Every structure is written in C-alpha cells, then in structure tokens.
C-alpha cells in the first residue's frame, strides 16, 4: 500500500512541476512579445498621427535600420572579444623522465588473498 502512495506522490509532484514550467514559459513568451512591440513603436510618428498629420508621419525617416543595428552588434562583439586575454599557442607539455608510475600500475588495484601459516 505504501508503494502505491509513493508512486502517486511522485506522479503528482511531476505533474505539478510540469504545469509550473509550462505556465512560466507562456508568461515569459507574452512578456517578451509585449516588450519587443514596445521597442518597435516610433513615438514621433505616433504623435503626428494623433494630431492628424499622417502625411508628415509617413515622410519621417526610420530611426534605425537593419544595417545600423548590425553595425552596432558587430562593434559590441569586437569590443568584447578584445577584452579576452590572448593565450599563447605554445605547448608546455614536458616528457616525464621516469617511465614507471604507480598511478598506472594495476598491481595496487588487485585484491591480495590472505596467506595461512
């Protein structure tokens, strides 16, 4: 009887965790969706459209283009890659002079039988 209740508890905890994970992912999706739409709003165009100046709003240049965004991203990438240390490519592995090493010996790993006297 105890095994069935333990299995039931495990299944319940698993389902509870799955529901929490799925709900969290849905919330994160909607948050990122709204935030991305918020950053894509051009406020000058919005103000001109509210005032009724639709022709002027259409003639406004775009604030940032894809090329500008790509240039900014490349600049940030190059800046962060310069902050890393440049490692030398020289190998520093030296050959050990003694061939025998107790770390690779299989003698110490074997069980020795006790001797009767």
Image: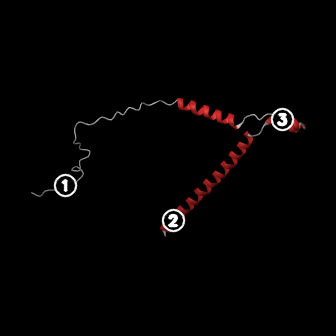
Which badge, 1 or 2, is on the more N-terminal residue? 2
Which residue position is annotated with label 2? Answer: 7
**Front of the two marks 2 and 3:** 3
Q: Is residue 83 above or below residue 5?
A: above
In this rendering, position of residue 114 left or right of residue 90: left
Residue 1 vs 105, above or below: the answer is below
Relative horizontal placement of residue 4, taking residue 36 as reference (left or right): left
- Which tag is nearer the camera, tag 1 or tag 2? 1
Camera-nearest residue between 34 and 116? 34
> Viewer-nearest of labels 3 and 1?
3
Q: Residue furthest left?
A: 117
Residue 78 is situated, as x and y percent measured from the top left of the image, at 57, 31
Cα–Cα gap, marks 2 and 3: 67 Å
* Numbered mark located on residue 112 in the image: 1
Q: Most extreme residue toward the bottom, as rendered? A: 1
Position of residue 102 relative to residue 64, above or below, is below
Q: Residues within 10 Å of mark 1 (few under 14, many from 20)?
A: few
Q: Residue at x 67, y 49 (%)?
A: 29
Whole-percent x, y for residue 99 in the image: 22, 41
How many residues crowd around disc 3 within 10 Å: few (fewer than 14), some, or many (20 or more)? few
Distance in Å between CA atoms under marks 3 and 1: 91 Å
Q: Please tell me which of labels 2 and 3 falls first in the chain.
A: 2
**Mark 2 and mark 1 in contact (Cβ < 8 Å)?**
no
Residue 60 locus on image (x, y percent): 82, 34
**Element at label 1:** loop
Q: Looking at the image, which residue is at 65% across and 36% down?
A: 70
Residue 59 disc label: 3
Distance CA(mark 1)–CA(mark 2): 45 Å
Q: Which residue is drawn at 26% across and 37% down?
A: 96
Q: Earlier in the sequence, mark 3 or mark 1?
A: 3
């Amino acid at each position: 009887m105890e095994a069935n209740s333990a299995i039931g508890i495990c299944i319940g905890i698993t389902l509870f965790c799955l529901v929490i994970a799925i709900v969290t992912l849905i919330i994160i999706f909607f948050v990122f969706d709204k935030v991305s739409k918020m950053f894509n709003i051009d406020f000058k165009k919005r103000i001109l459209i509210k005032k009724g100046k639709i022709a002027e709003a259409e003639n406004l240049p775009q604030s940032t283009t894809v090329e500008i965004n790509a240039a900014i991203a490349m600049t940030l990438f190059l800046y962060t890659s310069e902050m890393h240390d440049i490692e030398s490519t020289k190998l520093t592995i030296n050959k050990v002079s003694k061939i025998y090493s107790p770390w690779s010996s299989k003698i110490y790993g074997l069980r020795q039988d006790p001797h009767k006297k």
